[in-house]
Image (cartoon, helix red, strand yellow):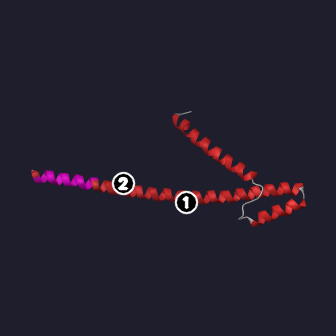
Amino acid sequence: MDADAQDEMPTTSGLLEDIRRRLLRAFQRAVPRAGSRRAREEAEAAAEAGPEELCSARVEGALAALRAELLEMRFQNRQLARTLLDLNMKMQQLKKEYELEIASESQDLEDHAVNQE
């Protein structure tokens, strides 16, 4: 394993640990998020029906929570991608401005040298 791969392992491990925690938290929730009315109604109906339905309702609730969390993660991912693209464009713009400034200064130095001769 090269040095770069070893450097990335803690980051990857931390990311996997974060995902594992989120999945566990989502599955441990017995009642789905308030935004999922259908899933909540299914959970309530299943609670009245019996233990098998209750288990099924808990799984459905956990799945609904996971879906909601995945949607939130997708939204955050898009925001981050947009921010990164904006930063990249700004960096390219600054680089061009810097290169133009350096070229202008270089030209000024050449003109100054020619004028002194």
Q: Viewed as shown, does residue 22 lie left or right of 45?
A: left
Instruction: State the residue position of label 2.
Output: 95
Q: What's the residue at 20%, 55% (across, down)? A: 108
Magenta-highlighted residues: 102-115
Q: Which amino acid does label 2 sit on?
A: Lys
How far apart are labels 2 and 1 at the CA level?
24 Å
Instruction: State the SS at label 2.
Output: helix
Q: Viewed as shown, does residue 97 lie left or right of 17?
A: left
Q: What's the residue at 30%, 56% (across, down)? A: 100
Tell me where residue 95 appears, x and y as whole percent: 36, 54
The answer to which of 40 and 68 lies nearer the viewer is 40
Asked if 7 appears above or below 115 in the picture, the reply is above
Residue 63, by quadrant, is bottom right
Q: Viewed as shown, does residue 7 lie left or right of 101?
A: right
Is residue 112 found inside the magenta-colored segment of the image? yes
Tell me where residue 47 appears, x and y as whole percent: 86, 59
Q: Viewed as shown, does residue 33 lie left or right of 100?
A: right
Tell me where residue 53 appears, x and y as whole percent: 87, 57
Residue that sits furthest to the left in the current view = 117
Residue 61, by quadrant, is bottom right
The answer to which of 107 and 93 lies nearer the viewer is 93
The answer to which of 42 and 7 lies nearer the viewer is 42
Q: What's the residue at 49%, 56% (across, down)? A: 84
